[in-house]
Image (cartoon, rainbow, N blue to C red):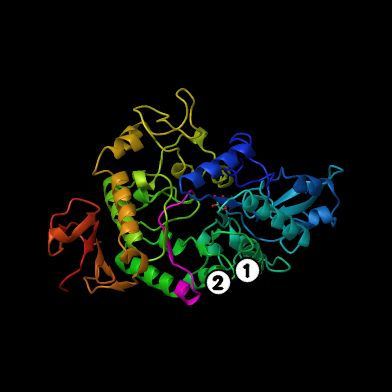
Amino acid sequence: MADGGYDVSDYCDIDARFGTLADADALIADAHGLGLRVVIDLVANHTSSEHPWFTAALAAAPGSPERDRYFFRDGRSGGEEPPNDWISAFGGSAWTRVSEPDGRPGQWYLHLFAPEQPDLDWDQSAVREAFDAVLRFWLDRGVDGLRVDAAPAMAKQPGLPDAGHVPGARFESRTWVGNPHWDVDGVHDILRRWRAIGDGYDGDRLFVTEAVVRDPERLSRYVRPDEMHTSFNFDYLTAPWEPRRLRTVIDESIAALDRVGAPPTWVLSSHDETRHVTRFGRADSSAATMGFDTGRPPADLDLGLRRARAAALLTLALPGSAYLYQGEELGLPEVEDLPDEALQDPTWERSGHTARGRDGCRVPLPWSGDTTPFGFTTEGIAPWLPQPTSWAALTVAAQGADPASTLSLYRAALRLRRSVPALHAEPLSWVSSDDDVLAFDRGPAFRCVVNLSDRSIDLGGQDRVLLASGPCSGSLPPDTAAWLSSPGEE
Ligand code: GLC
């Protein structure tokens, strides 16, 4: 748990804190019984430093096959300096020096994330073959798909050349992309290999990749017909609440993915990013990744929630698939005031306590009741991150009973998304509107209007409103979205 579980020491077992393999089997069976599918996270760029391969590599000599599974290199300047200038996503150098079995300071190993997450060398056939078996292990158990973690990291440029980072450079995913350790073409060989394994199984098996890359065109390479089925869309996730930028991202995403025959996807939040209620309530509403946005002015959370609700209707009206991050359906804000001693994200330590990291978007959900742990754990047992007492008003139980709640909005939107045929089949076509309004049709019978301006706009009749993200009576207030039936007159 050095990085919230993204440090795996046994790919074919369940951490005892979470249960057993029998529990996993029961969960998969129960989910299937409810018509839900289960996608597991495959973290294959790196293992845990507690994985038996890494322990064996530490005990073995430089140049040994055990070390070859990872990136062990001699340091520069007589061994004193890291082998190159690469930086870790959590801050600091991407290299850590080991003590050799005889106790002397020795080689360095690569970790693009935390030191407890040594990178595997995917050019090694031993690594490739071992992971084929891991995929089969889970697909055989009945999982419906895999979410491929940090896919662009899995191939490195031969020779591991410097990236050109200045000393002390900080991770910024947007400046990371296109480096010799990110989005290198060799990664696609690995993805094709996995897709071929998945295609050998009955039923629908979904492969989705996490790929933060330079632009939609680079992203489209991950979802070519023989690679992943789909991918998170970080250009959409990081777009500010700004009409022109959103429209450009939407158009570019649809066009780039269409060229390779993949569905577009939309995502507003994840376990790595500031929750979008908070992000959209900031003067600068663009996203900083991996919790590196400390020091931003406080958010206007009423404004953020209004925008987040409108963004939900925008997102769920777009063609393709949408990813919802647990808690966004409750309108949860980022918890920005977690006590220092509660923080668990490695970013906090690795940044020298300058970036608080991602814990604020990971606080356990409030289910019910007036006091913590709000039904998340048994009364009297503290959840792994403290929940704000103010979340009493945001519990699933409280919101489920309130038709105006964010949970009710999401439920209504998801119900319509299933039942309105236009939302399955029809392409998006923009409707001419003011620059600060996003309006599009999905065929002749459905329209989505999002008002990003600072004035109300006329909707031409309340009777056409299927659903709105806020109070709306024939005119749409600022930062509000509506779904309309039969667009009618232009
Ligand atoms: C991905 C995960 C993130 C994790 C990292 C390292 O970006 O989403 O949570 O820290 O990979 O595995």
- Number of labelled discs? 2
Residue 188 numbered mark, or none? 1
Residue 46 numbered mark, or none? none
Q: Is residue 317 magenta?
A: no
Amino acid type at image mark 1: His
Amino acid type at image mark 2: Arg
Q: Position of residue 245 (x, y in %)?
A: 35, 67
Q: In this orientation, which residue lies closer to the viewer: 108 or 277? A: 277
Q: In this orientation, which residue lies closer to the viewer: 289 or 433? A: 433
Which segment did they paint magenta?
256-271
Q: Position of residue 260 (x, y in %)?
A: 51, 75
Q: In this orientation, which residue lies closer to the viewer: 398 or 304? A: 398
Q: Which residue is mark 2?
A: 224
Q: In this orientation, which residue lies closer to the viewer: 153 or 338? A: 153
Cβ of mark 2 under 8 Å from ligand 1: the answer is no
Choose top left, top right, bottom left or bottom right for residue 249: bottom left
